[in-house]
């Protein structure tokens, strides 16, 4: 009998292997994030002060949307080819599958956005002193979004075209992330301590990562019937 | 050996799909070393019955009992003892046949690669081991799915139309594997709409609409 940790590592490896076999799906959110954020300096006037003022909001909205792009496929591909049923019968709790899939989704979308975010920060004329806060807030925010997304993806797994519906379910729930995430980055840009907003983001992340696996597993169980 | 303590019992199961009463009080029993062949025309609820037995679908009335305990109490423990093959082969197209087996079987038990390769060889799919599942033919995929059932080393086999897309040799192979399984004291519930010739103790349950 395979232990839970072992099963979790195995599932994570499976998800990452599958992602790297489809590099187009891996690159899409990144390219989307880079393109959307570089459109703003082109569209706005060349006033650096204006760009700097809107930078945190632009960065965060683009990151949320980029992270949403691949959400609906989180369980759908496995449901369509029948492997989700096999995973559900693997003798591991469904929450193990949810945790592994969510972490894999975050690693290939959220974490990758965090890595390229300094490039975007520079394009948006943000001071380099704010990069640390920006990366921390994006990391926590996208991880929380992946957990929220797992619930949305679990609820809509049986539907044909669920992309828009997942966004409609997840985006209202993601509003606090945008407020505190962009807020933290904005404070760092202005030279004020972002600690309060970052702590709240951390709290939201802990809340979702403890509750979302069970909510998403319950949603999947209903859809598997 | 006693079915009540060592086997599978389905007791008066009723399932509705919307307004449709799909399973109307179905009862069945399978004991160790026994195969039950569920047959019947399309749309009579054969697959639904199999999904109820897996625990994926909860019946509105009735219950499924495994080794004396209702499966609703501890579905995960029960599910770790079964191997289910749906009418889809359930393989990831981007993974090779061996990788498909590796990820799915190791979720249940530790299995070395050579053991998995031996299962692929037994089902005549050894040449598919390093090919992505998406390039395999439907028959080859079915053989890989059968290798997964074999590799899981489960006591209870639940097979949904295991002969689909298989050639004569493939069908014979599945019959042989089933005979070996029940010969070892395993239990098998097979949904197939055509006749099933398996050596050993086998019974038939015909479902009607």
Image: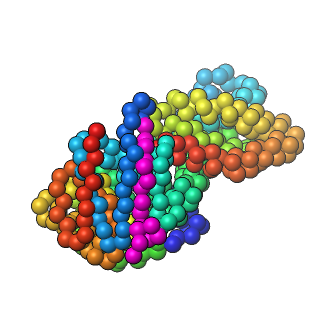
**Residue at 27% across, 54% down:** B205
Is B7 contained in the magenta span?
yes
Give the left or right position of residue B28, taking residue A53 as reference. left
Please name whichever residue, A190 or B97, is drawn nearer the observer in this view of the structure. B97
| Range drawn in magenta | B1-16
Placement of B182 over or under A218, stated as above or below:
below
The residue lying at 56 percent from left, 60 percent from top is B74
Tell me if I can see residue A70 in this picture: no
Image-based side of A133 in relation to B180, left or right: right
Q: Quick check: B112 above or below B64?
A: below
Q: Is residue A125 left or right of residue B177?
A: right
Q: Position of residue A173 (x, y in %)?
A: 68, 34
Residue B34 seen anywhere in this rendered image of the structure: yes
**Quadrant in which residue A122 is drawn:** top right
Front-most of B1 and A181?
B1
Q: Does the magenta portion include B127? A: no
* Residue B143 screen position, x and y as percent: 25, 62
């Amino acid at each position: 009998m395979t232990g839970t940790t072992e099963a979790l590592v195995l599932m994570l490896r499976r998800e990452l292997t599958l992602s790297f076999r489809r590099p187009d799906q891996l690159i899409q959110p990144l390219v989307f994030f880079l393109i959307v954020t570089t459109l703003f300096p082109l569209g706005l006037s060349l006033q650096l002060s204006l760009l700097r003022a809107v930078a945190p909001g632009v960065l965060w909205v683009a990151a949320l949307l980029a992270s949403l792009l691949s959400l609906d496929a989180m369980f759908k591909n496995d449901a369509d080819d029948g492997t989700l049923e096999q995973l559900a019968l693997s003798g591991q709790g469904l929450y193990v599958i949810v945790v592994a899939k969510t972490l894999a989704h975050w690693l290939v979308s959220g974490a990758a956005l965090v890595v390229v975010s300094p490039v975007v920060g520079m394009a948006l004329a943000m001071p380099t002193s704010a990069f640390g806060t920006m990366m921390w807030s994006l990391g926590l925010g996208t991880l929380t979004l992946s957990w929220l997304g797992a619930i949305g993806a679990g609820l809509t797994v049986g539907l044909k075209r669920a992309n828009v519906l997942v966004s409609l379910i997840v985006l209202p729930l993601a509003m606090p992330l945008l407020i505190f995430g962009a807020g933290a980055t904005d404070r760092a840009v202005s030279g004020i301590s972002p600690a309060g907003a970052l702590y709240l983001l951390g709290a939201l992340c802990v809340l979702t990562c403890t509750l979302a696996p069970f909510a998403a597993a319950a949603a999947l169980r209903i859809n598997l019937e | 050996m006693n079915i009540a303590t060592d086997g599978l019992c389905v007791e008066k199961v009723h399932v509705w799909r919307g307004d449709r009463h799909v399973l109307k009080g179905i009862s069945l029993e399978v004991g160790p070393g026994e195969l039950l062949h569920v047959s019947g025309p399309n749309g009579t609820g054969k697959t639904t019955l199999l999904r109820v037995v897996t625990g994926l679908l909860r019946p509105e009335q009735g219950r499924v009992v495994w080794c004396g305990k209702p499966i609703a109490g501890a579905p995960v423990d029960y599910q770790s003892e079964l191997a289910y093959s749906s009418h889809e082969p359930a393989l990831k197209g981007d993974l090779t046949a061996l990788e498909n087996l590796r990820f799915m079987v190791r979720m249940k038990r530790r299995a070395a690669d050579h053991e998995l390769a031996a299962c692929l060889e037994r089902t005549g799919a050894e040449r598919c081991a390093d090919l992505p599942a998406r390039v395999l033919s439907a028959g080859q995929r079915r053989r890989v799915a059968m290798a997964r059932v074999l590799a899981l080393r489960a006591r209870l086999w639940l097979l949904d139309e295991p002969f689909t897309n298989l050639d004569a040799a493939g069908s014979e192979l599945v019959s042989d594997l089933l005979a070996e399984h029940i010969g070892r004291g395993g239990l098998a519930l097979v949904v197939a709409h055509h006749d099933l010739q398996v050596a050993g103790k086998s019974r038939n349950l015909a479902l009607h609409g």
